[in-house]
Image: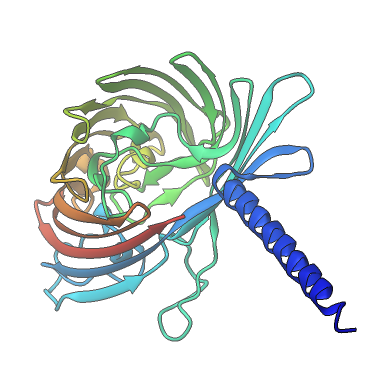
Amino acid sequence: MQQNLPTQGHTSRLTITRTAMAVALCMAAYSQSAVAGFKVGDTTEINIGGYLKLDALWTDTSDGQIATGIGREFYVPSLTPVGSAGESATWDMHARQSRFFISSETMLENGKKVTGRFEFDMMATTGTGDQRVSNGYAPEIRHAFLSYDGWLFGQTWTTFMDTNALPDSLDFVGTTDGTVFVRQAQVRYTTGGWQFAVENPETTVTPNGGGSRIVTDDNSLPDLVVRYNHTADWGGLTVSALSRQLSMQQGLVDDSVQGYGLSFSGKINVSKTDDIRFAVTYGDGLGRYLSLNTGNDAVLTRAGALEAISSIGYTLAYKHSWNDKLRSSFFYSAQQIDNPVDLTGLAQTESTSSYSANLIYQLASKVSVGVEVRHATRVLESDLDGDLNRIQFSAKYDF
């Protein structure tokens, strides 16, 4: 019995060693799959990612307080109060910008590849939670699309929008006043630098004499977009054109009018770490595409016809790295809406603008903290105006 003990101990040590090696190999394989994705069934690769983000915002407005909701959680130009009595500043904290995505890639039997993406956040959901107890908010779809052989089918950024021109900001959008910002269902074809898209339509209308926005949902034709992207070592430029039908069929009103938009945007590298980003967008009936629908697409005339509303937006941002961990962005954006005041009245927004600057510190490759300041102004057609001053603090973990 005693002679067998060393042999048993040796066997036990061997078993433990082999088990440890197996565990180590499994951990190594998992580590590689966490970086490169993993396989499920016939799908070549599935990736999971996103980020967790905490935002804390101190907001002071000159003409009253912004109501609880999205205007307190990120900058919405149309919600800057005008013409009310001043109130004290507000403090808000939320994690609703946090997001999660699943992407997949599959090689098909014909030698071509199909990819897909689901992405969710909680940023704009309403009616599913509040700040009293749980702060629970339901996820909503940001992106849901598949790509195959140059074609894209599903919901994602409108082809009329250039995401490369967006600034490095803590705010949800950043240069909101002059930015095209829409996600919607579409069919897009890309060949070289050209993109052609058929996208989901919608029309927003100002009632005759002013009043609450009318969302018609009466379009019989999709929105059409043509875009060209030029990329080079120094950055890139984008030119986009939008054609759309503005339509309303409600009660005695049955009319449609043509709308269009033109946009020129880009990103220019100043150095390996610094860049300039810009966009200029003009349109007749541009409405909901610009500045989170600050202005409407059209106004209803006394005769019950639609008249398109012209608007222009512009943005400029400069990103600068102070060192390998500290960076800043400085940006300005504005829009001008040409409301026919004899039809819309004087309570509609004539213009908005904002100046912002931030300082972001990269604690590690995936973790950052930052602070951002903003001053914004909203002016009505009556020349009444209101200001917003905001300080935003953020902590973010990309995974």
Task: Determine the residue positioned at 42% across, 65% down.
Answer: 96
Q: Work out whether 21 lies above or below 184.
A: below
As drawn, the residue found furthest toward the bottom would be 133
Measuring 81% from the left and 68% from the top, which residue is drawn there? 11
Please give the count of numbered marks on the rendered protein: 0
Q: Is residue 328 visible?
A: yes
Residue extending furthest toward the right: 1
* Residue 251 in the image, given as x and y percentages of width and height: 53, 47
Q: Nearer the viewer, residue 119 or 20?
A: 20
- Is residue 253 something that shows in the picture? no
* Quadrant of the snapshot with the N terminus: bottom right
> Which residue is painted at 74% across and 60% down in the image?
18
Quarter of the rendering containing residue 261:
top left
From the viewer's perspective, tell me whether residue 322 is left or right of residue 305: left
Q: Position of residue 383 (x, y in %)?
A: 9, 51
- Residue situated in front as seen by the camera: 28 or 340: 28
244 or 399: nearer the viewer: 399
Left of 84 or right of it: where is 41? right
Residue 367 in picture, x, y percent from top left? 34, 58
Q: Nearer the viewer, residue 364 or 86?
A: 364
Q: Position of residue 397 (x, y in %)?
A: 39, 59
State which quadrant residue 371 falls in: bottom left
